[in-house]
Amino acid sequence: MFDGATTKTAIVHRDEHGSAYAELAEDSDDVHVQANELLGQQEPQLLISVSPSFGGALDELRSLDYWLDQTGPTLANYGPNFGFWCSLIPMWAWRSDIIRNLLAATTLIDEQLGLYRTATSSDLSPTAIWHYHAAIQGMAMAKQPDKLCLTLASMLAWVFETLQKNYSAAKIHVRAASRLLSELEAPSDKMDKSTLDLITQLNSVLQLSASYTKAICEDNVDLLRTLTKGPIVARAEDLTIPPVESLIHARDLLLDSISRYIASDKTEHSARLQRLYIKSWHKAMRRYCSCSTRESHVYKKSVQLCFNLGMAFLPESEAGTFSYQATPNAVRHLLEAYERLVVEKQTRGSGPENDSIDKTIVMALELILDQVHHVHLRARAALLLQKLTAHHEKVGIQQGRLESKFD
């Protein structure tokens, strides 16, 4: 499937708004020049044995386009940084058949089963399964394995399995990535700076994946058995998610829960209960987004980020690297994601959802300003809040709350 592609190649472009798209090019000489220029802007490792042809089938070219425009940015909302998902992974897909197959498989599962978008199918297509199996076979049969490549592949395979809720398989890929990364780090004194930087990125992604796996993928624990310091007292609405009726409903459910938790004593018990509530909300939200055709992808992503917001206020013991307690980067990444959403919304032009998207972001920024004391993070949040409220002064949006007519 990857052979015989000598003239048709994918050249990646970005329009004036930064949106990416792939285009077929026919002149192989021009392709080599453009591909090398593109690769020259990336990590030095990517210049090794790179084929300027992205696969040999139209579905692979389409997958690259879809990843750059849809799947990559949605995954990047979780963290730890935008560049890993939207730059590093696509560029490695040019170099490696394994990564290319996993990229194709993951974009297909995103499109078909829906990652904060309306699903197009309840089952994976044979093409998605073929790409995934081809990648796994390539990983298993590699005679001279590239451990950097295999670590990236393990992280993509983790995404593929997690999106299907195959959590036991997903954990296997996290463990494999952890083992490979440990082997890579062993001779760190012999590595050049670019390789060390790449390993640092991989470490961040691995830690986030492990945190997500622990918080969301593992079975609910028996609180009475694992937490013995006093009785567990919780209201029913703090533990159960009613059927989600709309994105506004989903947003308000979680933000109200976050506010109640912040106002509580924040004990070990309440932190665990809050994490379990976020887990239930996360699953209900994904289910709603897959089925609903009423809202746009960008609106769904604005509510998706409430997950990161809720996890940020939990202790590291419950939220791992999603926790602001663990690292200020958790909030910095969240602010970057909101800034990207504002730009994405603006490029779409005016629409009936824009006010609801802005309200969601404003409510999140208020919580951040109320709870985060890091000077630079507060300044960044305040600046974005100021821009949003200034933009909506003409339609009656007040700082901190939008008028109910936008609901």
Image (cartoon, rainbow, N blue to C red):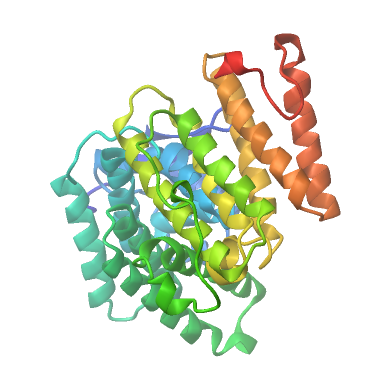
The residue furthest top is 394
Which quadrant of the figure contains the C terminus? top right
At 77% from the left edge and 26% from the top edge, which residue is drawn? 399
Q: Position of residue 11 (x, y in %)?
A: 44, 39
Q: Vertically, is 298 above or below 315?
A: above
Q: Position of residue 66 (x, y in %)?
A: 38, 38
Q: Position of residue 282 (x, y in %)?
A: 42, 48
Q: Position of residue 208 (x, y in %)?
A: 52, 64
> Residue 133 is drawn in which quadrant?
bottom left
At 55% from the left edge and 78% from the top edge, which residue is drawn? 229
Instruction: Tell whether 398 sits left or right of 155.
Output: right
How many numbered marks does the figure carry?
0
At 52% from the left edge and 57% from the top edge, which residue is drawn? 274
The residue furthest left is 126
- Decide if residue 65 is in sight here: yes
Say which of 202 and 331 sits in front: 331
Instruction: Tell whether 150 sits left or right of 333.
Output: left
- Decide if residue 16 is in sight here: no
> Residue 98 is drawn in which quadrant?
bottom left
Q: Vertically, is 136 above or below 116?
A: below
At 57% from the left edge and 56% from the top edge, which residue is drawn? 311
Say which of 336 and 132 sits in front: 336
Q: Vertically, is 235 above or below 7?
A: below
